[in-house]
Image: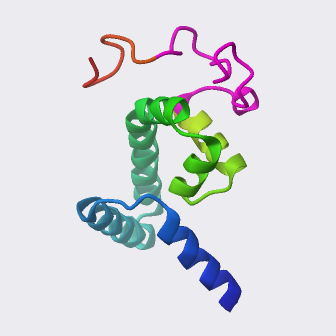
Amino acid sequence: MRDWDKHTVEVERSAVPLPEAVTTLLAQLETEVEKRAKSSPLAAIRAARRLEVLAAQTAYWPACDARRDAEPGQAAAALGLDESGARALLARFGRWSPSVCGGDGPDGVGALVEPGIRGGRHPGSGPGHP
């Protein structure tokens, strides 16, 4: 078990650090959801679902940017995952197929499921994005 503990510490150190405010909020959310799970499991599930929706809404553009800007190994290290896991996570948040994320597109990026996203942001296509 010590080897696994050492590994998880090393992975956490290599991952991109989260701001303290975000870490604190996530810890508070975890505590509150766990409390709800004891008294109202359905409320806990509803809260988890809201977090899931929030993640999908807020991670779309960062996933697209990371896919464009980071090498697979860089993304994996920053996310604390292996390359396959990082590719799958970025694909889920970026809403493209992970099977085409291997650089098979004409620009080496891979074909996206949603046409027209390659090359940058769409004006007015996302909340808070130009």
Q: Is residue 45 toward the left or the right of residue 17 in the image?
A: right
Report which quarter residue 6 is drawn in. Answer: bottom right
Verify whether residue 27 appears in magenta.
no
Q: Is residue 28 toward the left or the right of residue 54 in the image?
A: left
| Residue 101 image point, x, y percent | 69, 30
The stretch of residues the image draws in magenta is: 94-119
Q: Is residue 76 toward the left or the right of residue 100 in the image?
A: left
| Residue 89 image point, x, y percent | 60, 43
Report which quarter residue 100 is drawn in. Answer: top right
**Residue found farthest to the bottom:** 2
Nearest to the observer: residue 4 or residue 107:
107
Q: What residue is shown at x 43% (from left), y 58% (from top)? A: 16
Task: Please tell me whether residue 12 is drawn above or below residue 96 in the rendered image.
Answer: below
Q: How is the image coloured?
A: rainbow
| Residue 88 image point, x, y percent | 66, 42
Task: Please tell me whether residue 59 is drawn above or below residue 122 in the rendered image.
Answer: below
Nearest to the observer: residue 39 or residue 54:
54
Question: Main SS type for the magenta part?
Answer: loop
Report which quarter residue 58 is drawn in. Answer: top left
Task: Please tell me whether residue 79 is drawn above or below residue 116 in the rendered image.
Answer: below
Nearest to the observer: residue 37 or residue 57:
57
Q: Is residue 24 toward the left or the right of residue 52 in the image?
A: left
Q: What residue is shown at x 48% (from left), y 71% (from top)? A: 13
Verify whether residue 117 appears in magenta.
yes
Q: What residue is shown at x 47% (from left), y 63% (from top)? A: 41
Question: Is the N terminus in the top left, top right, bottom left or bottom right quadrant?
Answer: bottom right
| Residue 130 image point, x, y percent | 26, 17
Q: What residue is shown at x 62% (from left), y 19% (from top)? A: 112
**Tally of numbered discs:** 0
